Image: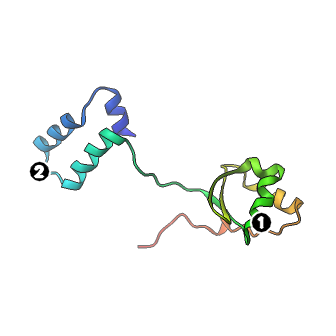
Amino acid sequence: MQLKKAAGQGLKVGQLLSLLAKNAAAELPPAFVKALKRWEVTGTEARVEVQTVLRASRPDVLEELRKSKAGRFLGEILGPTTVIVKKGAQEKVLAALAELGLLADDQTSEVSMTSEV
């Protein structure tokens, strides 16, 4: 995000690299230089996100949910039995599954955002 802000203020990647090279204690890592040059041409090429994923036991279960009123709460399809649940719609999707007579196991409360080293 800071790169985008700097570019919006007119800073070119070449200028940034020159400034960093002049003031760095060591040579800039080649992967870092490559990443900045690629970013200038293509922008951000990947991102890490936290998403809620619904995994159905069978493709027909997911299809039934997509055709229901809860279909609007489903986002990107990841596979024949997996789909992203739109942000804030988890409870609505679980309620819709119950209305359809489909049992669901909510495992989101079991997720820990910490990592062990």
The structure residue drawn at horizontal position 65% and vertical position 69%, both measured from the top left corner, is: 110
Mark 2 lies on a secondary structure that is: loop
Of residues 98 and 114, the one nearer the viewer is 98
52 relative to 90 in the view: left or right: left
Direction from residue 100 to residue 6 in the image, left or right: left
* Marker count (numbered): 2
Mark 1 falls on what kind of element?
A: helix
The answer to whether 7 appears left or right of 76 in the picture is left
From the top left corner, tell me how far across and down residue 101 is, in percent: 89, 65
At horizontal 13% and vertical 44% (from top left) the residue drawn is 21
Residue at screen point 18% across, 55% down: 29
Nearer the observer, disc 2 or disc 1?
Answer: 1
Question: Looking at the rendering, which quadrant does residue 36 occupy?
Answer: top left
- The residue beneath circle 1 is 60
Cα gap from disc 2 to disc 1, whole angstroms: 59 Å
Say which quadrant the N terminus sits in. top left
Q: Percent position (x, y) of residue 81?
A: 68, 66
* Residue 43 position within the rendered picture, expressed as x and y whole percent measured from the top left: 37, 41
Colour convention of the picture? rainbow
Nearest the viewer among 2 and 37 is: 37
Label 1, residues with CA under 10 Å away: few <14, some 14-19, many ≥20: few
Q: Which residue corresponds to the image point at 36% horizontal and 38% vertical from the top-left?
A: 2
In the rendered view, does 42 fall on the left or right side of 65?
left
Q: Which residue is mark 2?
A: 25
In the figure, 81 relative to 45: above or below?
below
In the picture, which quadrant includes the C terminus? bottom left
Q: Look at label 1 and name its amino acid.
A: Asp
Given the image, on which type of amino acid does mark 2 rest? Ala
Marks 2 and 1, the one that precedes in the sequence = 2
Compared with 27, 3 (above or below) is above
